[in-house]
Image (tube, rainbow, N blue to C red):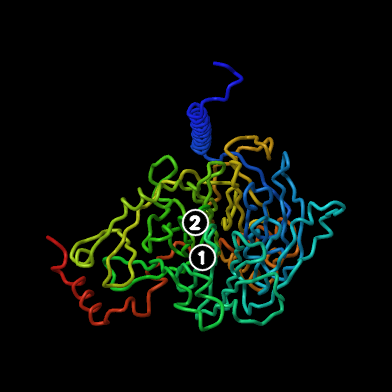
Amino acid sequence: MDPTQPTHPHRRRRSTTGRIYSDSLASNMIERTRREMFYRACAQGFPYSRKLTAHVSCVNYLMFSRKGGRWLASAGDDFRILLWDFNQEDVRSPSGCYSGPAGNVLSLDFSASNQYLISGGADNLVLRYDVSRLVSPGVQWAPERPLPALSVYRRHDDSVRSVSAHPHHEELFFSAGEDGRIILHDARADRRSSSAQGIYQHTTEFTGVQAHPVMEHIFATSDSHGQVCLRDTRMAFGPLSTRSNEGIVQTYVTKLSKRSLGYLSNPESSSITFDCDGGRLAVTMLHWYPTIYALSDPYPLAVCTGRNNPDGNPVPAGERTYSNSCTMKSGAFGGPGIGEDVLYAMGSDDFRGYVWEIPETTILTSLRQEIPTEEWYTREWHDVVGYCEGLSATRYVPSEISTPLCRLNGHRSIVNAIAIHPSQLHIVTSGIERHIVLHSPMPSSAIAQDLSLTPLEVRKLPEYSPEDEMRFLGALLGTHSTLHGDAGQSDDESQTILLFDHILGEEGEGDIFELRQCKENDDDEDDEDDHVLIDIMRSPSASPP
């Protein structure tokens, strides 16, 4: 063929198609290899760790920045917000510090492009910081000179439990407060404005708010009565004439039912989080288990428990395992480097973090059990807990993920916060102690060198003593500096740990059906119908012989 002549158009088309196919094949091979490496590393757990120590009190919240996860933001009871640079070759100390909080910090989030960091806490304030100042030429940060907030928002009348930035608009973010308010902030507007168009007022305390990571008008909320809702900003905010149904487009079923009881339980939904594409939502429930939902399905897909050890063997009777009874906790989805979130992680009262592998939604849906009302009341269901909308409604029993992928050690007290790095195989945990623990499946990585093996032993909860009662009363009266943000010695941290040991002894391992009984009507049907069902349930002839 004469090389000076143009290539035949059909041949040129086939050549282009061949290159596209070859590129796609190579991309699939790379993706498959990445996944194989990910699962191989995760199968070993995260046995290596390092303590990151810079806070002087409890660390309540951890958040990685979006996309590459360069920054880790941490905050807690010392009224400071620290930034750790995970672009370093060996992260050991913070690269920035922010001042401004006048109370315990309870929530953090980065804006859409990571230029801003938003915080909320027990001082009723929402603060907004400019992260770009840390990397600006000429800016020299020192621990004794923390950077101030760029903006301060004073529109809540009680603790701000949660903040969440809009996924696309840099200037928009949500805050949720114990004053029953969800506020949609627009940093372009006057922050002192008293306009109510961006405020939704609820009848009970909000415990969480999360902007959907993809759909710009959608957000989720949780409250102290256990209600978890998906809402639309176009229905929840703006002039009263345009608002409808409190903005709710979906209400998730969170009430629990036992065959042997004539009432339901409604656990407090203490925090919520989406996975990276917004297809699934995880709800943290006080005195119950983390529960996974599909976005468009009101009924739960799965509950994550610690019934088994990571090797699949049952946890021996009397040995502590996953529980959540007495502190605010936040969970996290993750799937470092593989483009989808296949892991869910959560802190626990047994002084460990838990990581579960979450199967595909279609698999979980097929495993979920649906029990019609009549069948529920005419058969025995030993140790089965169903989710339902009311006493006369169908019960849904989600799949139980009873074997965690791994457990994260290294703490001496309750683990409250956990975050999974978006691209590196690292998980960070924190809680009652003043340090953060960085976990890894390997002793060295691109961002941390020479990590140590984490001790496998977990501190046991001590037996009660009269001396502990005196320390507990002393802490409540404010005599321990670690509870109030002042720098102290290690003895102060030990006293704080003893305080929470006492609380665990008093409140831990509580039965959710005894602690949280539904007091209002459970559904829209007549009370008489529910009484008939209860009578059927109690009848000796209800169960098959």
Circle on res. 76: none
Q: Position of residue 422 (x, y in %)?
A: 59, 47
Crowding around mark 2 (Cα neighbors within 10 Å: few <14, some 14 to 19, many 20+) is some
Question: Marks 2 and 1: CB-CB under 8 Å?
Answer: yes
- Residue drawn at x 37%, y 80% is 520
Residue beneath label 1, please?
218
Residues 407 and 204: in front is 204
- Residue drawn at x 64%, y 37% is 452
Q: Is residue 102 left or right of residue 344?
A: right
Residue 283, compared with residue 440, is above or below; it is below
Outermost residue, right direction?
Answer: 138
Residues 500 and 212: in front is 212
Q: Secondary structure at mark 2?
A: loop
Toward which corner of the image does residue 509 lie, by quadrant?
bottom left
Q: Is residue 19 left or right of residue 361?
A: right
Task: Identify which amino acid the numbered label 1 is placed on.
Answer: Ile
- Residue drawn at x 17%, y 72% is 539
Residues 148 and 132: in front is 132
Q: Secondary structure at mark 1?
A: strand
Residue beneath label 2, please?
278
**Quadrant assignment for the C terminus:** bottom left
Q: Is there any visible trace of residue 40 in the rendered image?
A: no
Task: Identify which amino acid the numbered label 2 is placed on.
Answer: Gly
**Quadrant assignment for the N terminus:** top right
Q: Is there any visible trace of residue 438 in the rendered image?
A: yes
Label 2 or label 1, whichever comes before in sequence order = 1
Q: Position of residue 479 (x, y in %)?
A: 70, 70
Residue 527, compared with residue 429, is above or below; it is below
Q: Is residue 236 left or right of residue 360?
A: right
Toward which corner of the image does residue 290 lie, by quadrant?
bottom left
Structural distance between the alpha carbons of marks 2 and 1 = 10 Å
